[in-house]
Image (cartoon, rainbow, N blue to C red):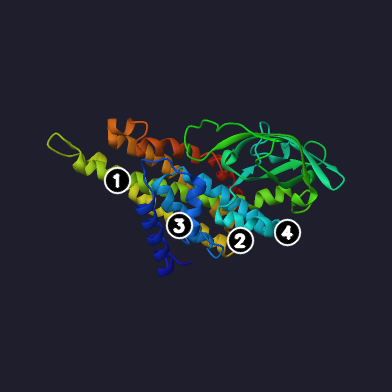
Amino acid sequence: MQVLLEKEKEDFKQRTQAFIDTRLNKSKELNLKALWQNLYKEGLINKENGVLQNILLSEILCKFRPGIGLFLITQFTCIEIIKNFASDSLKEKYLNKLFSGENISCFSITEPNAGSDVSMIEAFAEKKGNSWLLNGHKIWASNGSISDIIITFVQTKSHKDKSGITCLIIPSKCKEVEILKDTPKLGVEITPSNEVFIKNLTIDENSQIGNLGDGIKIALSTITLGRIFCAAQAVGLLSGVLEESIKHSTKRNQFGKSISDYQAIKWYIADMTKDLDAARLLLHKAAWTKENNSEELNKLSSMAKYFCTSAAQKHSANAVQILGGAGLIKDSYVASAYRDSKVLEIYEGTNEIQRLVIAREIL
């Protein structure tokens, strides 16, 4: 695989950074839909981008504001599902709108009793002639309150029958779909997560993605991509906390010298730098395996997610320590990153699950 980025990818990184420097402001609220649309207009998001380019985009944006990563994961995942599994008519209806940002998508699979075990899904769809009648309750629906469409997973047979779980695309803005206000989270607050209630919603049978019972296959197909994007989010965050730690420690003076002159701080900075480089290399290797359909994809996507998010959590805590009182201010970059980093260890499959996957792939 290519260890160093080709010139094209380096140029892409520079264009992304220039977009952030000229168009975004840390102190202002971000409209995520408008952000996506502007990235599309600048050519930073387009149909021709490979996995690595989208990963680089996510890494650089997440250095600026780590919580953006969940928004990006969700939109790219839903695009991937429609591109790979939807009918030609659904592709024609939605793909251009999703790439341009005219439509924002929500990914909705989790339920109160269905998390890592998706076979426990209870949301139900009943066939009525040429239509589906849906009822269900979803939680942690990413992008819910800002979405135009929802990709969701429902049971079409008896409870716990994996062969009945099916993927459907439904509208967000209709009276039969109630999206509750954003769920307050420990971190990643900029991307909304919502409870969704579906009550007697009727949709055309052509809104089905894939075949009847393909739901688990479709959901699992997104797992490796989601893990890699989560790793990119962690690498961006880690890059940001390292920069903040260097900036503060070289300017902060105590007992007559910069605190960066003290061994304890030097060791923190050295460990951050070492782990950032290792995390980025593992991230890029995982992205390469995704682009090249490598047999190691499952193992490497889990390794990247596990290592990168663990490193981000460890070093964001150290960054708070370096900044001391300044790091305790709730809205400071490192305090926000510290909260975000804990969330990264949980979504897209907990890190305990990643360890099981890695061991299973090896053994």
Q: What's the distance in space between the residues labelled 4 and 1, CA to CA?
A: 53 Å
Q: Nearer the N terminus, badge 2 or badge 3?
A: 3
Q: Amino acid at mark 2?
A: Glu
Q: What's the distance in space between the residues labelled 2 and 1, CA to CA?
A: 36 Å
Label 1 with label 3: CB-CB less than 8 Å = no
- 47 up-or-down from 191: above or below: below
Residue located farthest toward the right when viewing the structure as drawn: 129
Q: Nearer the N terminus, badge 1 or badge 3?
A: 3
Which is more foreground, mark 1 or mark 3? 3
| Label number found at residue 89 | 4
Helix, strand or loop at disc 3?
helix
Residue 283 showing in the rendered view: no
Residue 304 coordinates in the image, percent (x, y): 50, 51
> In the image, is 198 to the left or to the right of 348?
right
- Residue drawn at x 47%, y 56% as measured from the top left: 39
- Which residue, given by chain and number where applicable, does mark 3 sit on? 56
Q: Amino acid at mark 4?
A: Ser
Residue 2 showing in the rendered view: yes
Q: Nearer the N terminus, badge 4 or badge 2?
A: 4
Label 3 with label 4: CB-CB less than 8 Å = no
Q: What's the distance in space between the residues labelled 3 and 4, CA to CA?
A: 31 Å
Residue 88 coordinates in the image, percent (x, y): 72, 61
- Which residue, given by chain and number where applicable, does mark 2 sit on? 295
Image quadrant assignment for residue 314: top left
Helix, strand or loop at disc 1?
helix
Q: Residues within 10 Å of mark 4 (few under 14, many from 20)?
A: few
